[in-house]
Every structure is written in structure tokens, then in C-alpha cells.
């Protein structure tokens, strides 16, 4: 390595722009920071020798220079910014609404958004944030953070550590804040020194040359916050592995005991009761807003659960024992925590159909006496029901979650949220079937103005069931099938999480915030006094908040003959 | 309860009037000789006192409404936007105490007032909290975001003043036109506030029925319908018939109503702008620019940068960190790529880029001022478009 010896005697590393000790511009290197064409010195990184601006021969040098450039960093940020924005134009795959035409992205996007939706889907924007190219952008930002920081931190640290009170005149008079005073007494200089100390400047002196400095630690702020960001990016990387991050979901019915997925059958959950509270529409405070909203607003989702732990049986082959860990009341914003896992209240279903009983009537029978009845277990529907060996009912179509969209009948989900059936009814002794359509209880309840997402249908289900349609598509039926009674289940959706990356995120965030505050809320200020003949040269520099620095100088020279610094500007 | 709520509304109105009067006095400081000297004249002292009194009045509004509703009034559009206006005033006072620049008040306070007026367009009833919002993190997260945004808004105000001061109005070039477009947007917002207030005072209502996801739903227009919802029928009688229907590609609940509001804002805002141009006989930017002749542009640039330097950490804390902690508490995932989250990240990216660009020569002054304006645009986009158009966790209306 070639070293450069300055006239002050200090030996600088190759590529130095301003001598680390006295600040004298080093001949031949001024183009690096663009000082050759300017009146003022570029004070970024103190004109220290950075690897990125010194070496540019090998590929490593070129990659290093590329990623250490602030310009490249800003471009990466801007690209990430635009890409992130594109991802919000249409909902992500995970946010396709439950009542959409289809939850299959290949159908949802083109059907809902036309050609634009189709292109959006084909470009993979429905999963943009987990696409390889988005991750590459984020990773590049990470690489840039590391290289930028190393490239600048080390030389900057050296330069600030080795700076001397005595600066070269050409350093002083090329500062943004500069003044010249012909005659200054030693007394006045002493006053200034005292005042500077009072403002908590640290003073260094060398043969009458003075540098007053404060807030140097704010210069490290950017590097500290970059470390924080790197930790956050690493944590995000770890989170993609199943060891560090586990996320599962479980539906539990009222009274049901089931194993908690993701816990290796170690933990069991019993749902004692799911509670859905709603706001009273007569509540004094909220009645206006509730009336305007026109629907029931929930106030609390809660599941009372008991968590059990499975103990290994002592004898192999014997069923394991469940040991109660604790009772929990899980609410929104109040998850249950046990054994490293966290259980969150995530969803609910208050009107899941479990059993439906149907009765067969003769059409136009004034007495309306049932001729037969059958019950469908919706968790285990059969294809055919024999009724007292007289009637026979064949299930032609079963829609567990019936919906009608644009003349198309389909089931939205596989859950029995709104069952509907197409039956073939074989009257006694007949080989010819009558077709009838029965179901869509939820549809009729909504038509009656009942908010089925917030109101239990259990007590009134039978009544509403009799309003549900029973349609005779041919118009030639002699019998009809009506809903007689319905049984409902309530179930609670809970998500299970175990996230070992949280401490890393917390650490990264903490370091980031410390770094940002350090860099933003403090400033590095330096004031130089350079004796010259009878008088002095006064110069000052700060990395931000020049206004504050100016006020500091005004205060310390108040009442002395020292000239206030002038703001030097570029001529162009 | 009623009494408390009435007192609360009165205090908000009082605050608005105080800000208005304070603006007039800040305007009066222009005539004083040294507009940026340490010693503020009488008008300046009175103006900042009135501003602080206004802030106190608004604080009383905030506290009394909190007492009446039982939760911090930051839970719907009306409450949040009002609070944002208050944070802008607070941020202005902080910056004023540092820089003592009177004329900043002449621009910052009207923007704060526009926020408060815009808020009042939304339903003002006290609304109950849904379970997911029932957390003390609501207060911590929302208030910190609003404070951070308020401080970032000051950088917008300083940037706008810088441009009005510096952009040469004598020749019509891209910079002059862009600046005028920014000012035109303010007129559109004023147009929206004006027309909404007029028709809401008249209790105007027109109800439409239309199909949404196979269900018959109703939507209420509070402005006469120029654009009806797609394939809808007008239910209310004796109101203006719609001129055309909202195109079908505009999705989401109440898309028609929102589109209709946009049309009205364009019409009324453009009319307001046209009228102003007619009265001034020059560009609005050119008309304001003489007011700023005595201000040091370097100082405006410094305020622009300083506001970002102060606001950025607070915004990060509220908009990303507290937001993540709450999301972790509520859903077990601290980040979910919800549009609101993504736009908070975009805002953060943007200001991070701004801070890095400030390191380079050539990005100070005018370029920084433009950046401050774009940043403001991004925050407003997240507030208005993401809340009202892109559905997600934060959709309010």
C-alpha cells in the first residue's frame, strides 16, 4: 500500500482526500470527493480514504464500489418502494375475501378484475412479497447496508480519532462557516473557550490552535442503526424456517377436546365455551353510531379453554394421560401463553349446521301430517335414506355452503355453513322420483333481516327452517320435503404460534431505534480557532442543523471583537 | 354524557376559530421589518399565544371526548384526522420554538385547519370499538404515528414555502406548472369539504340499491348523484337523477358513492380555483410568492430537513414498531403485508431515501422541497386512498 505523508508529518493511507490530522487537501486526490471544482471542501466522512473510492481494479473492488455507493443504495430503496406499492394494487392471495367468487387465484383475479387481474396474477403479483425478485431486492439492500457501513465506518473512525487541533489554513478557509478577524486579544479567546466549555464543547489545544467539539457520537448513529437493520433482516430470514417459526390453526367446537396441531401431540385443548358479546343497540353512548351502521357490532370474541399436556405413559401401549396445565380465557388482544406456544383468538363460526331433520308431506294436504322423517348428519351425509321402508330419499346434490352467483349454484366452502340439497324422492312403491330442492336457511334468515354472523340461530333455527325454500322444479310433485329442525354447533378458530425469532427482532429494532435517535437528535459540531498574526481565523462544521451551530457561535463570541462566521457559498 | 359531548364539540370549534385568528396575526407579521429575527414583534407573540390556546382548546376536546366515549378518540376517520390536525399544530409549535419563523404559521395553520375541516365530513358519532381495537396499543400506536406524521407535515409546509419562494414565476415551465398542480390539489380538497358541508347541512340523502357479491345492498349518497353505483336503482324519490353509472371495474363497497364524491370535488374545486385565478389574474403560486420574499430560503430548507430528522424516528416508532407489537398481540403476526402496513413501509422507505439523498451535494434546496411534497403525498395516500379505497385492516368507511 502506498502511504501519503502530509506536510504536518502525519502518514495517511492511500486514497485519503483530506489529511486525517490537519485536514490539508492532499494533492492528486481532490477529484475523489469533487473538491477540485468547488470552493468548499466536501466534509463527508472527513475526506478519509475509503476502499470503494480508492481501489477499482478487480471484480471484488467493483462489486464493493457498487454496493457501497449511496446512489445505488437509494436506487435499491426506490425500487423496493415501487415494488411494494405494486403489491397493494390488488389484494394478495392470502387476502382474497371469503365471499369472493372463488378462492382459487387463477379464477379470482381474472373474474374480478378482468384482463388487468389476469396479467397481475400471471406476473405473480398476488404473492409479490414472497417472490424471488422481491427477496433479492431486500437482500441487496442488506448487502448494501453491510458494505456501505464497513466502507465508511473504519476510515471515518480513524480520521476523527487522529484529528488535531491544528488545522491547515486551506482546510479552515474552505469551510462553509468561516470568518477572519484581524486583531483578537488572548483574553477574548479565553472568554470564548470558557463559554464553549459551558455549552459542553470539548476543547483541544495545540500551540494556540483550538478545536471545540461536541456530539461526535452522533456520527456513529447511522452505523448503529444499520447494524440493527441487518439483525432484523437476518431474523426475517430465520423466520422462514419451521424450527424458528411455527404457525398452525385449529377449529374447536364447544365442548370438544382435541390435540393442538404443531405441538407434536404434546398439548391438547378443550373448548369449554365460545362467547360472542355484542353491543347493546340501546347503549346510551353508541346508539347513534349503531343505528347508522345498521348491523350488530361485536364487542368481544372469547374462548374459555383448558389446556392439557400429554404425559408419556409408563407402560408402552397404554393411552397417555392428560394433565391439566391451566384454564384460559382467550380474547382478541389477550392470547393464552403456555410452554413456548401462544394461542390467539382468530375466528369463529356460531351457526355451523350439525344435523338437519326433514319431514315429508303430501302436497296440498290441509292437515299437513308428516308422512315420514329423516335426519341428515352433516358431518357424515349418506347418499340415500330409507324411511320406514316406504319412502326412499336419494341425495342427488349436497352443497354444504350454498351460494347463488350469477345463475350459478355452488358451494363456497366444504364446511356446513349453509347446507342445501337436491333430493330424489321415491314415493312408496314407485320407481319414478320426484325432484326437490331444500335448503339455504342462512339466505332466508338474512332475508328476514337477521345478521347471521352475530346472532345465534340455535333457538329460532326451527322456525327459520320452515321459511327456507322447498322448490319443486318440475311443478308436478305430489310430495314435498320441509326442514323440521336444525342443530347447530359453535366453533372457535384459534391460531397457534411459536416464534423463536422475536428476541432477534426486538434486539434489532432496539439497536435500530438507538442508532436513529443517536444520529438524528444529536449533531456533531466542531468549531476551529486558527491563530494568524494578531488575529484569528474562525471556522465551523456540522453534519446537520447549521442553524443550531450558528446560534452556538453567536453566543460564544458575543461582546468580543471576533467576527461572526459568514456562510460561504459555492460560486456557481 | 350529552353535555360532555356538546362541550367537546364546542371546544373543537373554538380551537378551529383560534387557529383561524392566529393565522391572521401570523399574516400580519409580514409587514414587520425583520420577519426572521430573534425578537418577534407584537403580532407574532400574539399569534403564537393564540395557537397555543387553540391547541389547549383542542386538547380539552380530546379529553372530554375520551371521557364521553370511554376510549381515546382516535378510532375512526373523524377522530383520527382531527387528531392529525392537532399533531400538525403541536409539531408547528415545536419547530416554531426552535426557529421563531412567524411566516411558517401562515402556511402550517391553514393546512391544520383543512385537516380538521376534512375530518368533519366523516360521521362524528361516537362509535363502539370492535374487539380487535380493544387494546391500549390503539392509543400508543395511533398517537405516535399521528405525531410523527404531524412533524413530517411541517417539512411539507417548509418545502412548499421554499418552492413558492424560489420557483421563478416569470416563465411557464415544468416547475411552475407542477407547483401550481400541488396548489390545485389543495383547492380540490377545499372543494370537497365545501360541497360536503353544504349538502350535509341540508341533510341531503339519496339511496341506491345494487347487487354486491350476489346480495342486494343499499348505499346512501349524501351528495346529489352524478354517478350512480354500477347497475343500481334509485330508491329515494324527489332527488336528482344520476347522469351515468360508475364503471364496473371500480370495486369495493360504496365505490359509486366515493367516485361521485371525487367528481363533485373536481367540479367544485376547479370552480374555486378558476374563480381565484380570475380574481388574482395570475397563477396562485405567483400571487403568494411576494409574501415570502423576505424569508431566507436556506432557513426553509433547514426546517424541511430538520422536520424530517425529528419526525422520521417517531414515525418509525409509531408506524412500524408499535404497529408490529400490536399486530403481534392481536393476531400473532407482527407483519402481514396488509396494504396499510405496506404503505407505512413505503413511507419509511421514502423518507429513508430522502435522508440518504441529503448526504449528497445537489439534493439540498429545491430537490429536497419536492421530495418533502412527495412524502406528504404518500402519507395522504395511505390516510385517504388506502383507508377508503383499498380494503384492509384499517378500512374505516
Image (tube, coloured by chain):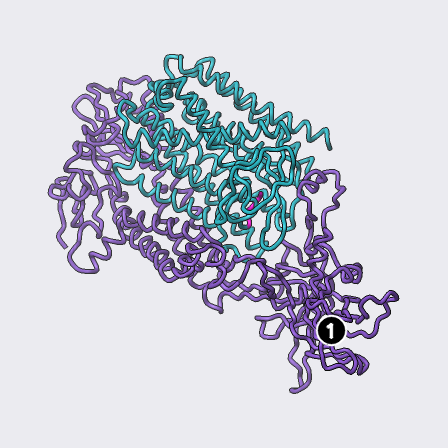
Chain colours: A purple, B cyan
Q: Position of residue B61 (x, y in %)?
A: 62, 30
Q: Main secondary structure of the magenta part?
A: loop
Taking A318 as reference, is A393 above or below it?
A: above
Q: Is residue A122 left or right of residue A65?
A: right
Q: Nearer the viewer, residue A389 or A274?
A: A389
Q: Secondary structure at mark 1?
A: strand
Q: Is residue B386 left or right of residue A350?
A: left
Q: Position of residue A448 (x, y in %)?
A: 73, 53
Looking at the rendered image, the quarter that the N terminus of chain A falls into is bottom left
Residue drawn 55% across the image and 53% down it: B327
Looking at the rendered image, the quarter that the C terminus of chain A falls into is top left
Taking A116 as reference, is A184 above or below it?
A: above
Magenta span: B393-397
Q: Is residue A132 visible?
A: yes
Query: Which residue was labeled with disc 1?
Result: A376
Q: Position of residue A398 (x, y in %)?
A: 65, 71
Q: Nearer the viewer, residue B33 or B31?
A: B31
Residue A361 lies within the magenta run: no
Q: Is residue A141 left or right of residue A399?
A: left
Q: The disc numbered 1 marks a residue on which chain?
A: A
Q: Position of residue B232 (x, y in %)?
A: 58, 45
Amino acid at each position: 500500500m502506498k502511504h501519503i505523508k502530509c506536510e504536518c508529518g502525519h502518514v495517511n493511507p492511500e486514497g485519503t482526500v483530506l489529511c486525517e490530522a490537519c485536514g490539508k487537501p492532499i494533492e492528486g486526490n481532490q477529484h475523489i470527493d469533487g473538491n477540485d471544482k468547488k470552493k468548499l471542501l466536501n466534509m463527508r466522512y472527513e475526506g478519509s480514504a475509503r476502499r470503494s473510492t480508492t481501489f477499482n481494479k478487480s471484480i471484488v473492488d467493483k462489486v464493493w464500489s457498487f454496493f457501497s455507493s449511496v446512489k445505488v443504495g437509494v436506487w435499491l430503496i426506490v425500487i423496493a418502494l415501487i415494488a411494494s406499492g405494486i403489491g397493494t394494487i390488488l389484494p394478495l392471495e392470502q387476502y382474497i375475501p371469503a365471499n369472493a367468487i372463488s378462492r382459487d387465484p387463477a379464477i379470482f383475479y381474472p373474474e374480478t378484475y378482468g384482463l388487468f387481474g389476469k396479467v397481475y396474477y400471471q406476473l405473480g403479483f398476488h404473492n409479490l412479497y414472497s417472490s424471488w425478485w422481491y427477496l433479492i431486492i431486500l437482500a441487496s439492500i442488506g448487502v448494501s447496508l453491510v458494505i456501505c457501513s464497513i466502507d465508511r465506518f473504519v476510515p471515518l473512525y480513524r480520521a476523527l480519532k487522529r484529528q488535531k487541533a491544528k488545522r491547515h489554513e486551506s482546510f479552515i478557509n474552505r469551510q462553509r462557516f468561516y470568518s477572519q478577524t484581524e486583531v483578537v486579544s488572548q483574553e477574548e479567546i479565553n472568554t470564548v473557550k470558557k463559554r464553549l466549555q459551558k455549552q459542553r464543547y470539548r476543547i483541544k489545544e495545540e500551540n494556540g490552535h483550538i478545536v471545540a467539539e461536541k456530539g461526535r457520537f452522533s456520527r456513529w448513529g447511522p452505523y448503529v442503526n444499520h447494524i440493527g437493520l441487518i439483525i432484523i433482516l437476518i431474523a426475517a430470514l430465520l423466520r422462514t424456517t419451521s424450527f424458528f417459526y411455527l404457525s398452525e390453526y385449529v377449529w374447536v367446537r364447544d365442548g370438544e377436546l382435541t390435540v393442538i396441531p404443531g405441538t407434536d401431540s404434546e398439548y391438547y385443548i378443550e373448548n369449554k365455551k365460545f362467547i360472542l358479546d355484542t353491543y347493546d343497540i340501546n347503549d346510551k353512548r353508541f346508539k347513534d353510531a349503531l343505528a347508522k351502521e345498521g348491523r350488530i357490532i361485536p364487542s368481544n370474541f372469547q374462548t374459555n379453554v383448558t389446556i392439557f399436556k400429554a404425559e408419556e405413559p409408563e407402560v408402552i401401549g397404554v393411552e397417555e394421560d392428560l394433565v391439566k396445565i391451566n384454564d384460559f380465557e382467550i380474547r382478541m388482544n389477550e392470547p393464552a401463553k403456555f410452554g413456548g406456544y401462544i394461542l390467539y383468538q382468530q375466528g369463529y363460526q356460531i351457526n355451523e349446521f350439525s344435523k338437519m331433520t326433514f319431514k315429508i308431506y303430501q302436497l296440498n294436504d290441509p292437515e299437513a301430517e308428516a308422512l315420514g322423517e329423516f335426519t341428515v348428519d352433516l358431518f357424515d351425509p349418506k347418499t340415500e335414506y330409507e324411511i320406514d321402508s316406504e319412502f326412499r330419499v336419494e341425495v342427488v346434490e349436497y352443497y354444504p355452503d350454498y351460494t347463488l352467483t350469477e345463475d350459478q349454484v355452488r358451494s363456497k366452502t366444504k364446511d356446513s355453513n349453509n347446507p342445501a340439497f337436491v333430493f330424489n324422492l321415491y314415493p312408496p312403491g314407485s320407481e319414478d322420483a320426484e325432484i326437490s330442492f331444500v335448503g339455504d336457511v342462512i339466505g332466508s334468515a338474512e332475508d328476514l333481516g337477521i345478521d347471521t354472523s352475530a346472532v345465534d340461530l340455535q333457538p329460532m333455527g326451527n322456525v327459520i327452517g320452515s321459511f327456507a325454500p322447498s322448490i319443486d322444479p318440475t311443478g308436478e310433485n305430489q310430495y314435498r320435503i320441509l326442514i323440521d329442525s336444525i342443530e347447530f354447533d359453535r366453533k372457535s378458530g384459534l391460531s397457534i404460534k411459536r416464534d423463536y425469532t422475536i428476541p432477534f427482532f426486538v434486539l434489532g429494532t432496539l439497536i435500530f431505534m438507538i442508532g436513529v435517535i443517536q444520529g438524528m437528535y444529536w449533531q456533531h459540531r466542531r468549531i476551529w480557532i486558527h491563530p494568524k498574526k494578531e488575529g484569528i481565523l474562525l471556522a465551523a462544521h456540522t453534519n446537520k442543523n447549521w442553524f443550531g451551530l450558528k446560534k452556538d457561535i453567536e453566543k460564544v463570541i458575543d461582546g468580543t471583537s471576533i467576527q461572526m462566521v459568514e456562510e460561504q457559498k459555492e460560486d456557481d | 354524557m350529552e353535555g360532555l359531548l356538546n362541550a367537546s364539540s364546542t371546544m373543537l370549534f373554538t380551537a378551529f376559530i383560534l387557529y383561524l385568528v392566529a393565522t391572521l396575526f401570523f399574516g400580519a407579521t409580514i409587514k414587520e421589518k425583520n420577519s426572521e429575527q430573534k425578537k418577534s414583534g407584537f403580532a407574532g407573540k400574539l399569534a403564537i399565544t393564540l395557537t397555543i390556546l387553540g391547541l389547549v382548546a383542542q386538547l380539552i376536546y380530546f379529553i372530554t371526548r375520551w371521557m364521553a366515549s370511554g376510549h381515546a378518540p382516535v378510532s375512526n376517520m373523524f377522530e383520527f384526522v382531527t387528531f392529525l390536525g392537532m399533531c400538525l399544530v403541536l409539531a408547528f409549535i415545536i419547530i416554531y420554538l426552535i426557529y421563531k419563523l412567524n411566516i411558517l404559521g401562515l402556511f402550517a395553520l391553514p393546512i391544520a385547519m383543512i385537516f380538521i375541516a376534512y375530518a368533519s365530513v366523516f360521521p362524528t358519532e361516537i362509535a363502539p370499538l370492535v374487539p380487535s381495537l380493544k387494546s391500549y396499543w390503539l392509543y400508543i400506536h395511533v398517537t405516535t404515528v399521528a405525531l410523527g406524521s404531524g412533524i413530517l407535515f411541517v417539512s411539507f409546509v417548509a418545502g412548499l414555502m421554499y418552492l413558492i419562494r424560489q420557483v421563478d414565476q416569470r416563465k411557464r415551465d415544468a416547475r411552475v406548472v407542477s407547483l401550481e398542480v400541488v396548489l390545485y390539489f389543495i383547492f380540490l380538497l377545499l372543494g370537497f369539504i365545501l360541497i360536503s358541508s353544504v349538502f350535509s347541512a341540508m341533510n341531503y340523502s339519496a339511496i341506491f340499491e345494487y347487487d354486491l357479491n350476489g346480495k342486494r345492498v343499499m348505499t346512501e349518497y349524501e351528495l346529489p348523484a352524478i354517478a350512480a353505483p354500477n347497475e343500481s336503482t334509485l330508491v329515494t324519490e324527489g332527488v336528482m337523477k344520476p347522469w351515468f353509472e360508475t364503471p364496473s371495474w371500480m370495486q369495493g363497497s360504496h365505490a359509486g358513492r366515493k367516485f361521485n364524491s371525487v367528481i363533485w370535488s373536481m367540479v367544485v374545486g376547479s370552480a374555486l380555483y378558476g374563480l381565484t385565478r380570475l380574481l388574482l389574474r395570475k397563477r396562485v403560486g405567483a400571487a403568494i410568492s411576494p409574501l415570502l420574499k423576505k424569508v431566507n430560503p436556506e432557513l426553509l430548507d433547514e426546517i424541511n430537513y430538520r422536520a424530517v430528522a425529528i419526525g422520521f424516528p417517531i414515525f418509525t416508532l409509531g408506524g412500524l414498531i408499535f404497529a408490529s407489537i400490536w399486530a403481534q398481540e392481536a393476531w400473532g403476526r407482527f407483519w402481514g403485508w396488509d396494504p396499510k402496513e405496506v404503505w407505512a413501509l413505503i413511507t419509511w422507505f421514502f423518507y429513508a431515501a430522502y435522508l440518504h439523498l441529503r448526504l449528497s451535494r445537489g439534493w439540498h434546496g429545491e430537490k429536497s422541497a419536492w421530495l418533502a411534497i412527495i412524502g406528504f403525498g404518500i402519507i395522504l395516500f395511505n390516510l385517504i386512498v388506502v383507508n377508503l379505497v383499498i380494503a384492509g385492516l384499517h378500512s374505516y368507511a
